[in-house]
Amino acid sequence: MATQKLLLLPGDGIGPEVMAEVKRLIDWLNAQGIAHFETEQGLVGGAAYDASKQSITDATMATAQAADAIIFGAVGGPKWDSVPYEARPEAGLLRLRKDLGLFANLRPAVCYPALADASSLKREVVEGLDIMIVRELTGGVYFGEPKTIADLGNGQKRAIDTQVYDTYEIERIARVAFDLARKRRNKLTSMEKRNVMKSGVLWNEVVTQVHAREYKDVTLEHQLADSGGMNLVKSPKAFDVIVTDNLFGDMLSDIAAMLTGSLGMLPSASLGEVDVKSKKRKSLFEPVHGSAPDIAGKGLANPIAMIASFGMALRYSFDMGALADKVDAAIAAVLASGLRTADIKSEGTKAASTTQMGEAILKEL
Amino acid sequence: MATQKLLLLPGDGIGPEVMAEVKRLIDWLNAQGIAHFETEQGLVGGAAYDASKQSITDATMATAQAADAIIFGAVGGPKWDSVPYEARPEAGLLRLRKDLGLFANLRPAVCYPALADASSLKREVVEGLDIMIVRELTGGVYFGEPKTIADLGNGQKRAIDTQVYDTYEIERIARVAFDLARKRRNKLTSMEKRNVMKSGVLWNEVVTQVHAREYKDVTLEHQLADSGGMNLVKSPKAFDVIVTDNLFGDMLSDIAAMLTGSLGMLPSASLGEVDVKSKKRKSLFEPVHGSAPDIAGKGLANPIAMIASFGMALRYSFDMGALADKVDAAIAAVLASGLRTADIKSEGTKAASTTQMGEAILKEL
Ligand SMILES: CC(C)[C@H](C(=O)O)[C@@H](O)C(=O)O
Ligand SMILES: CC(C)[C@H](C(=O)O)[C@@H](O)C(=O)O
């Protein structure tokens, strides 16, 4: 069995706690001989800043470049609110995404039946929801230059951010989204603001071309990002796969996650291009939720999103789809048994700590 | 009684139908001697394009500059999907906003008790909701330069949009929002993406300064726009006034509107700076909903958002707060009586056409 190199980056807040549950799972898979993962652990975000005044070091970046997959917890917290902009916790995550070329961010929004009542939406609106948001992750306003604050004198400053998209960036993310749609319900919705933004005009044009050239069998629909957001809140089940840019994807995927009532449950995958020679792609897996500093260190965090993110790693980076299915089934079984961390607790269910939840999922496996 | 000059711009789709109900109301106010409005009607959007190949003409812009208030319907529709970018229907609206300096967009999101069940959210989450989104309307990525698509050769294009914010633009919109909060529940939430955008950093800094200097009595809170959007979906009633930039405001206000289940009911006001000499400000009032081309011309449109927008004109441009209250009360009374246009129809209510709804509100007055 080939050895697979994993870099674990727990980060800040509840990151280390939920990562510990993935570590438990990895150790078990190794001990059982089901897989052979070699893990290394690194610092990112505030934790890295405290140690090195940088949100990620060049040494950790080198390890990340060499890893077969990165498992990422969460970064940030009020403790680092006043560190210099370039060293803020989020910068570590953004550097990983950019330097590793992780352009395709897959964010499933699934409503677990056992949790349908936890949503602020009506049960019938979200029950059975299973959509996939594909967010472009290395372009747009996140990385475009100029990105500056200039002093104009007289107490006036001018801040500038730049949204840049090239044809090839839109083409490759569109292909990822169309391919996913083909494996699902065969429908893709592309969202932009072409009525206001030139990048929206190009986005619309390129997605339309890729569709006409390569994916005529998939149903393609275009929506403006504002009314698309509305529709997501009104009737989320009308969607299958949604493809959108970095900033709209940031907003829309958070909203979609919240709709499901399962924020502490949702994983994400960030993928690079497939290397022609090695057939491998760089990849990073992280929960959709953040570092939740308010509950950190209390054993209250829900490890399911983190474990499900590792499940996505099995599926997308290690071609272990069957094992990934088992992980998902174990999560569903534990939920069905009534075990709940604090974030998803409801009447008649059994309370579990982070560790108890992790152990229960492992036992189910 | 002073004569007040109104420019009516019905626009496209259902715009003319809903505007007709405002016209009915204006005629009645004039006939009763309650007010003296002088109205002029103009073309904007696709309607203007069909007549002049421009989405608004210089002549109409001159009338707009001279008007005491502009009442705007809606623009756009598939008919104009392939007109040149510069002449697309939305360009007329954007030119009005920019040239008249309408920097402050007020978008109340109110859940009418009679309609709480129309929301996709649970009744208890939205019942009694009354929040105000204050959106910056003349800056940011909507108007920043460069805004271009360049041909890079080899089938590659590069699209660029630029988000620009100066200190004074953030200061003046913050003041509008703080002033509104003072008249409401005294709480302001500012939203940006300071962890990714320099404009977010400046936005956060300036709002914090304005607060410390002039509005210490108002509770100020900062949220990232993505998690803020989440919170809006999770517990909208936790908010009072939200202030945010042009693009985030576009997304968040549409989502907030949808939460209420009252999309066809929500008005908006766009205001300029108060002129030192005349004490007047330029202003435009429009429904939050769009042109809904699919139901245009069928008498199905809900005129309430348009009538309520005219109510906002009475309040914000003509200092007729008492009359505005009466308009709002008439709308609430008609809803309570069970009359409903198709968009808000539910079991046990009485169906009304656009005209029947407009007439009923007038009768109530
Ligand atoms: C932490 C932050 C930089 C990040 C983003 O804005 O992309 C987060 O919100 C996300 O969605 O992964
Ligand atoms: C029509 C369009 C240009 C406009 C906008 O994006 O501002 C609309 O969505 C709005 O919110 O008023």
Image (cartoon, coloured by chain):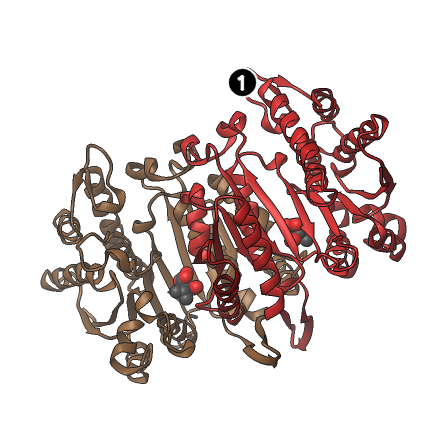
Chain colours: A red, B brown
Q: Amino acid at mark 1?
A: Glu
Q: Position of residue B97 (x, y in %)?
A: 40, 71
The residue identified by callout 1 is: A347
Position of A191 compared to B325: left or right?
right
Position of A217 compared to B284: left or right?
right
Where A110 sits versus A207, above or below? above
Q: Secondary structure at mark 1?
A: loop
Residue A256 seen in the current view: yes
Where A117 sits versus A249, above or below? above
Q: Position of residue A186 (x, y in %)?
A: 48, 48
Q: Mark 1 belongs to which subunit?
A: A
The residue closer to the viewer here, A52 or A33, is A33
The residue closer to the viewer here, B197 or A216, is A216
Could you tell me which residue is drawn at 58 percent across and 76 percent down? B155
State the image quarter where residue A122 is shown: top left
Quarter placement of the N terminus of chain A: top right
The residue closer to the viewer here, A29 or B91, is A29
Quarter placement of the C terminus of chain A: top right
